[in-house]
Image: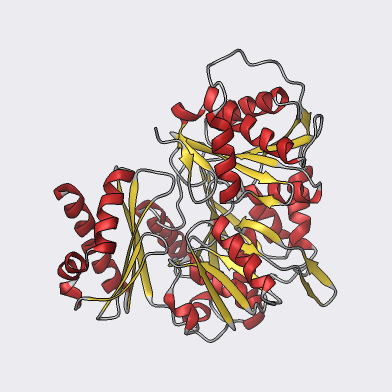
Amino acid sequence: MTLKFGTSGLRGLVSELRGPPARAYTIAFARMLIGRGVSNEGEKILVGRDLRSSSPEIAGIVHAAIAEAGLVPVDCGALPTPALALYAAGKNAPAIMVTGSHIPDDRNGLKFYRADGEIDKRDELEIVEIHAGLQTASRSQPAVELLQLGSEPTANYKDHFLAYFQTGSLSGIRVGVYQHSSVARDVIVDILEALGAEAVPLGRSTHFIPVDTEALRQEDLALLKGWAAAEPFDAIVSADGDGDRPLVADAQGSFVRGDLIGAITAHFLDADCVVTPVSSNSALERCGHFATVLRTRIGSPYVIEGIGTALAQGAKCVVGFEANGGVLLGSSIEKDGRALAALLTRDSLLPILCALSTIAVTGRPLAEIAADFEFLAAASGRLEGVSAEQSGSFLKRLATDADYAGTLFEILGGVANVDTRDGVRITARNGEVVHFRASGNAPELRCYIEAKTESRADELLGWGLDLGQTQILES
């Protein structure tokens, strides 16, 4: 069974989600809300979806389950996850997003939002507990009379940014927009054009493409390079399937990693504290741009928890981001009479706009702006088809058997430090970093690398993946 909560939401194979499971998890979420007294019978739950092939059907199951639980489903159609979350928060309503984010089309998922924001790990445990006590047998799906909001939530999302970023602020900036199958593809173009940029749509797809902004496919990297060589762009931008993670490439079509885009965003917004998982680049503490860097486990619920901690400790402007580039704005921001409300869910548009605005304000190319942060070269990859049990056995031995780890890492001078906050992150004695972690939503072992040069990072990634594969096969 692949269906489980991961770093953000419930995900698994479509064949294991559609039908009774989607119904039961939706009812469990609704009962959690009712049981806590934060939702009452007859109140609304907003529902959105991405563009993958199974999402309309699963959204229909979610609508029926909400009605079965005594609440009112409101259909928001296809829209970015942060747009749904922002609108729901403004209406003080819970929400469910039907999306598998960046994972392949044969998988899908549900993201749950309380009226005050994304659910946390405690909520997940309660939903799982309620779900375990439900009858999940198949039953006929009753007809549901839906309230439909049309374009209102998406328009609200656009206004959120246009109220802060000044009209004409991106004039003279030329941006390629890799549209593929992202539900944010048209919103990105609309906002960029509204701010004065020339936005050129590229690579629009009629079928779902699993663009993972933390581990881009070679096809995506080739497309970025090809578009940059064919015509002049200041940057090429995109987002993942549900629009909560950005993809940004510079004028040469070189991908700018998500944690670096997060750092550029935080610096542009004058953040005094950044909250980011342990997998983000270790140069964040050394770059000198932020008074405080608070590290967390991987996953937006942990970043949200860290943002709360930072605010409680007195931080004034808190920006959270993940290595995949998704930015969570922990503090409302005001500048020159313009305001940007906090949004405690991953968002792709804010980092895209901050990166482009930095180009516009400084007059410098993105590659130079990125170089200022002196990030170590990084690479990431994954071994597919690795079960949680296989990953767990390897990671446990790596974390607890010093002789075993020392032997494996002897080629890198041995082990200098082991961080087990999320997976096993090993800093070798030569200063290089190899971080292994089991994926939270797919049968994969992920590997994250830091090294001095890109060529060395790629070389070390290959070594790390080979090491993981060999050790798993031998176990």
The residue that appears at 78% across and 56% down in the rendered structure is 159
Depth check, front residue: 81 or 117: 117
Q: Which of the 4 image quadrants contains residue 164?
A: bottom right
Depth check, front residue: 411 or 264: 411
Q: Is residue 373 above or below residue 343?
A: below
The residue that appears at 52% across and 41% down in the rendered structure is 10
Q: Is residue 184 above or below residue 168?
A: above
Residue 350: tell me if it is visible: yes
Q: In the image as oriented, which residue stretches furthest toward the right?
A: 337
Q: Is residue 180 above or below residue 264?
A: above
User: Where, quadrant-wise, is the N terminus in this rendering?
Assistant: top left
Image location (x, y in percent) of residue 380: 35, 61
Depth check, front residue: 337 or 320: 320
Image location (x, y in percent) of residue 308: 65, 65
Image location (x, y in percent) of residue 151: 76, 41
Image location (x, y in percent) of residue 138: 54, 16
